[in-house]
Structures are given as C-alpha cells and as structure tokens.
Image (cartoon, rainbow, N blue to C red):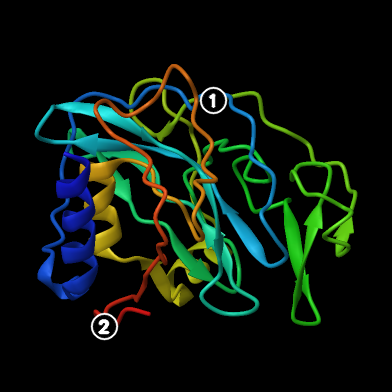
Amino acid sequence: MRTIRILLTLILFALPAAAFAQVRVSVRIAPPVIPVYEQPICPGDGYMWTPGYWGWDDGVGDYYWVPGTWVMAPEVGFLWTPGYWGWGDGGYFWNEGYWGQTVGFYGGINYGFGYFGVGFGGGRWDGGHFFYNRAVMNVNVTEIHNVYNTRVEENNNHVSYNGGNGGVVARPTPEEEAAARAGIFHLSRSRRNMNRWLGPLPAFGLQPITAIHPLAQPRDRETLSIPLRLRWERKGTGQVQ
C-alpha cells in the first residue's frame, strides 16, 4: 500500500494541473470546529505558516483534517490567505486560499497563529526578509534572528465556517475583496488531490513538519517522509511553479 501511494504521488506530480477538473462540491453538513493544536517549530528562515483546515472526502462522505504546515512563499513579499468554508445556496462551499501581497478575507475564521479572523499578525516582510512575530509564531531565535514580539488580540471562537446556522458572521471589506482579485497563486490541483489520497505531506525535506491534532487525524492516511516540493498554480492560467 505504501509503494502504491508513493507511485500515485509521483504520477500526480507528473500530470499538469489542468488535468484535474475543479469541481465545487456543496456539502450539506457543517465542518467541525477548528482543533486546538501546537504549532511545530519553524524549520528555517523564510518559511511561512499555512494553517490546518477541514477537507471534504466526497467518497467517504465526511470531513478530514488537513494539518497546517510550513512552506516557502512562491515569491518574496507574498502572504498566505487561508481558504474557508462558507454557507450559500443551501450548502457549504470551500473557498480556495491564495498567495498575494496582502492578506484578504478568510471568512472571519480563527485559524490561530496570527490568523485570528482578520488580517495576519504572525509576521511581516521587510527588506526582502520575513520577520516573525514571536508572540504567535514558534521560531528558534538561536537560528532565526529576524523576529519581533508584538502582542496580538486573539479570538476564542473556533467555529470553522462562515454563514449558515451557527457560523461566523463576517463579510469582506472592499480592501479584502481587492486582495482576492489581486491574489496570484493557489495550491495546485494535483496537491489538493493528493490530500484526499495521502492526507498531510511534508512541505520540504525528508521529515514531516505538520501539526496533527490527536482527535482529528485523517482516517487511513499516512504522512510520507519523502522529498516533495509544493506546487503553486498561477490563478486562471494553469501554470504551475
């Protein structure tokens, strides 16, 4: 089984992103609350945190937890806007996350670690380098020196969806809508498809650096300790880098 999954990984990476049709699935049940978990330590200078979220497995008919992980931004100066579940037209729909020069709307969802519903308080770009806010980010200051410490007001609401019954009540500002239009990269379809087969995968290197909540692990999925590179797709073009 492990050999088969590794072969599937290689096949998926070999296929162009355009080979995977983007189907927007409407889910009738709301996703569970965002679990509280510890953030793994940042593996090195320049890595950015992308928070965990609930994925949907249409074959199983249930949600599974995709752990957060550290990745490199596709370009200097870019920040990650997480995706989010939102209610509309009688169901819950997943809104894709994306990279851009500013953080946009992510449903008012409290993903933690700087993503407390509005904007991002986990760090900032300055002079071509990313500076980490130690108040909310787990970094080793003996290895990473571009840090600062600024308290961020946290949100104790762990509801994982926007709108609908019991969902977060939040709407995008004009600035957040502009950020979404300007966003360039989102996770390639091949990587999203692998989430359904394999669950969490390491961002870079030989060791997985994901954060997994013990009560929210994907069923029958493994974290594979093989070298991988996340692929980012330029929005609307199918170009992957």
Give how far across and how far down residue 1 sits, in percent: 16, 39
In the rendered image, the vertical position of residue 6 relative to residue 67, given as above or below: below
For label 2, the SS is: loop
Left or right for 54, reference 38: left
Toward the top, the furthest residue is 215
Looking at the picture, does residue 173 appear above or below residue 118?
A: below
Q: Which residue is mark 1?
A: 158
At horizontal 51% and vertical 42% (from top left) the residue drawn is 210
Q: Is residue 22 left or right of residue 221?
A: left
Q: Position of residue 63 (x, y in %)?
A: 27, 29
Within 10 Å of disc 2 (Cα), the crowding (few <14, some 14-19, many 20+) is: few
Q: Which mark is residue 237?
A: 2
Q: Nearer the viewer, residue 70 or 75?
A: 70
Q: Residue at x 83, y 58 (%)?
A: 143
Q: Amino acid at mark 1?
A: His
Crowding at dot 1, Cα within 10 Å, few <14 / some 14-19 / many 20+, comes out as some
Q: Secondary structure at mark 1?
A: loop
Please name whichever residue, 137 or 185, is drawn nearer the observer in this view of the structure. Answer: 137
Left or right: 241, with 175 as reference point: left
Q: CA distance from mark 2 to mark 1?
A: 34 Å
Q: Earlier in the sequence, mark 2 or mark 1?
A: 1
Measuring from the top left, give residue 69's x and y in whole percent: 52, 48
Q: What type is the residue that disc 2 sits on?
A: Thr
Quadrant of the rendered structure where residue 135 is? Answer: top right
Vertical order, 52 against 157 (above or below): below
Which residue is drawn at the image coordinates 27% and 43% (left, top)? 198
